[in-house]
Image (tube, helix red, strand yellow):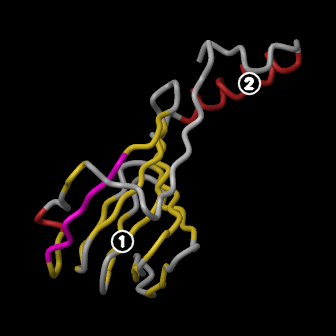
Amino acid sequence: MSKSIVTAPPSTLDLDQPGSIPPAWVLSGNPETRSKILGRTHDWTSNIVVWECGAGSYTWHYKQDEVIIVISGEGFMTNGDGKERRFGPGDVGFFPAGTSCTWRHPDHFRKVAVLKESIWRPLGFGLKAWNKLLRMVGLTGKSPL
């Protein structure tokens, strides 16, 4: 079975899924959001999304591991250490599931996000061992998992 490869220009991509930040998380402004899922892994544990929001500030609680690459705009993130960090175009960040931080956007902000569901650590170890065994016997890429 052939798998398709997805390519898209994230800076000009039309984002067709309106959304909102939970009202209890919004600290100031009205940071309306829009997004588009570009792809999802076969096992549905990961997906890649282009996401944007307007000016405002909010608290964000990460339910999944998230890697971001900023496409346009800027965001100022403050986490538990109290230090504010600036994210601008080209910057990359990693936010583990279970963490929280405060974001502030003076204007429009767009990012590409790779979201991954956390799995139980022993299961992850078992999966790595299984895939290593498959590679050792020459069955790379044949895992049913």
In the picture, the quarter occupied by the N terminus is top right
Percent x, y of residue 13: 41, 56
Question: Which one is in front, 16 or 87?
Answer: 16
Q: Residue at x 35, y 50 (%)?
A: 63
Q: Secondary structure at mark 2?
A: helix
- Residue at 12% x, 65% y: name it: 24
Checking the image for residue 26, the label placed there is none
Q: Nearer the viewer, residue 23 or 52?
A: 52
Q: Please give left or right for residue 61 compared with residue 120 in the image.
A: left
Q: Which residue is mark 1?
A: 101
Q: Is residue 142 above or below residue 82?
A: above
| Label 1 neighbour load within 10 Å: few <14, some 14-19, many 20+ | some
Q: Name the quadrant of the C terminus.
A: top right
Secondary structure of the residue carrying tag 1 is strand
Q: Position of residue 61 (x, y in %)?
A: 31, 60
Location of residue 136 by image quarter: top right
Q: Residue at x 49, y 38 (%)?
A: 46
As displayed, is residue 50 above or below residue 43? below
Q: Is residue 140 above or below residue 6?
A: above
- In the rendered image of this protein, does residue 44 appear above or below residue 10? above
Q: Are marks 1 and 2 in contact (CB under 8 Å)?
A: no
Span shown in magenta: 30-36
Q: On the picture, is 27 further left or further right than 79?
A: left
Amino acid on which disc 1 is placed: Cys
Residue 51 drawn at (x, y percent): 36, 59
Quadrant of the image occupied by residue 44 = top left
Q: What is the three-letter code of the residue carrying label 2?
A: Ala
Would you name the residue on which mark 2 appears? 129
Q: Earlier in the sequence, mark 1 or mark 2?
A: 1
